[in-house]
Image: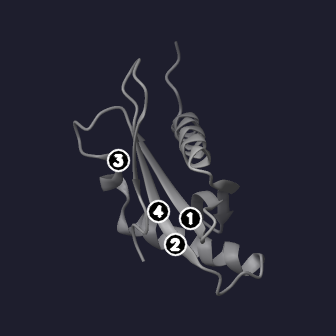
Amino acid sequence: MAKKSHREIGNEAEDLACAYLESKGWRILERNYFFEHAEVDIVAYDDKAIVFVEVKMRSSTKYGHPMEYVTEEKVKNVFKASEAWMYERKMDGSPMRFDIVGIIQKKNEAPEFNHIEDAFR
């Protein structure tokens, strides 16, 4: 069996995160929004705000929790992409926030979710 690419693993993580967020009643508005070199994994709406979600998945916590892999550079890119997303849709000034969904997906086990709302500003 061929090893999965980073993109395939990323898509799998985002599929899991979208299903998780939808189970909470959220609406997924967009996935993989790019602006220049910046990306937002998921743009969703939770009945209160537009939520820009960074998704991180790991197969264990041996080298740390998934959230620990959200770097300062990644945060800057999420801000940049989110501003462009809001501007393009003429939604400047609408309530928005930034969440992280960390997923631990051990082999042959159900995924474990850790959702941090308003993770960074």
Cα separation, mark 3 vs mark 1, equals 17 Å
Query: Of the residues shown, which amino acid type is indicated by label 4?
Result: Asp
Residue corresponding to mark 1 = 52
Mark sitting on residue 2: none
Q: Residue furthest bottom?
A: 93
Query: Of the residues shown, which amino acid type is indicated by label 2?
Result: Arg
Callouts 2 and 4 close, C-beta under 8 Å: yes
Residue corresponding to mark 4 = 99
The residue drawn where x is 43% and y is 26% is 110
Cα separation, mark 2 vs mark 4, equals 7 Å
Cα separation, mark 4 vs mark 3, equals 13 Å
Residue corresponding to mark 3 = 66
Mark sitting on residue 97: 2
Residue 48 x, y percent position in the rendering? 60, 71
Is label 1 in a helix, a strand or a loop? strand
Callouts 1 and 4 close, C-beta under 8 Å: yes
Q: Earlier in the sequence, mark 3 or mark 1?
A: 1
Q: Residues within 10 Å of mark 4 (few under 14, many from 20)?
A: some
Callouts 2 and 1 close, C-beta under 8 Å: yes
Residue 88 x, y percent position in the rendering? 76, 77
Count of numbered circles on the image? 4
Is label 4 in a helix, a strand or a loop? strand
Q: Residue furthest right?
A: 89
Q: Earlier in the sequence, mark 2 or mark 3?
A: 3
Q: Earlier in the sequence, mark 4 or mark 3?
A: 3
Is label 2 in a helix, a strand or a loop? strand
Q: Nearer the viewer, residue 89 or 33?
A: 89
